[in-house]
Amino acid sequence: MHLPIRSTLALLLLLISAGCQGSSAEPQTLSREQLYRLHCSGCHGDGSGNGHIAGTLAARPRNLKHNQWQDSVTDEHIFRVIHEGGEAVKLNKAMPAFEEKLTKEEIRRLVGYIRFLGR
């Protein structure tokens, strides 16, 4: 079955416009919890260092819920560890740097969520 040229063009324009509707909208902003689940929970799990890949690492990931650790670090330190990675701050080199994956605002939201985990 052949469609007339006008119908074919109309259908093509409809499909193109449907595919482009989301392109002009602002990108979705992930919540701090969503960011954590996406980028941190694989190693840190629920915050206790019990993520699904934690057992494959040479050293257990940090327990982010530990009160003594929470009290001993600044927000700036947590930010730097996430931004630059563990090796940059003389911690475990298995902690990757997220400077090219996350914006500074996203990292600040992660710092806030990590603080929340310690409560």
Image (cartoon, grey):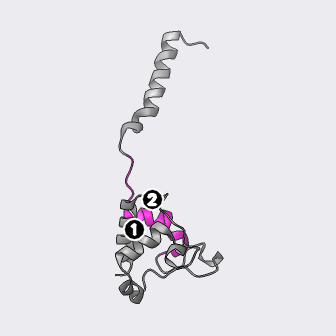
Q: Can you say which quadrant of the picture contains the N terminus?
A: top right
Q: Nearer the viewer, residue 114 or 77?
A: 77
Quadrant hosting residue 87 = bottom right
Q: Nearer the viewer, residue 35 or 81?
A: 81
Magenta-span inclusion, residue 18? no
Quadrant hosting residue 116 = bottom left
Residue 45 position, x and y percent, is: 51, 74
Q: Residues within 10 Å of mark 2 (few under 14, many from 20)?
A: some
Chain part drawn in magenta? 27-46
Residue kind at label 1, given as amino acid type: Leu
- Please name the residue that numbered disc 1 is placed on: 110
Q: Can you say which quadrant of the picture contains the C terminus?
A: bottom left
From what the image shows, is residue 103 above or below residue 81?
A: above
Q: Residue at x 38, y 50 (%)?
A: 28
**Residue 24 visible at all:** yes
Q: Alpha carbon of mark 1 to alpha carbon of mark 2: how far?
A: 10 Å
Q: Which callout, 1 or 2, points at the residue further toward the start of the chain?
A: 2
- Please name the residue that numbered disc 2 is placed on: 102
Q: Residue at x 43, y 33 (%)?
A: 20
Magenta-colored segment: predominant secondary structure: helix
Magenta-span inclusion, residue 37? yes
Q: Secondary structure at mark 2?
A: loop
Residue 40 position, x and y percent, is: 49, 69
Residue kind at label 2, given as amino acid type: Leu
From what the image shows, is residue 100 above or below residue 8?
A: below
**Residue 116 visible at all:** no
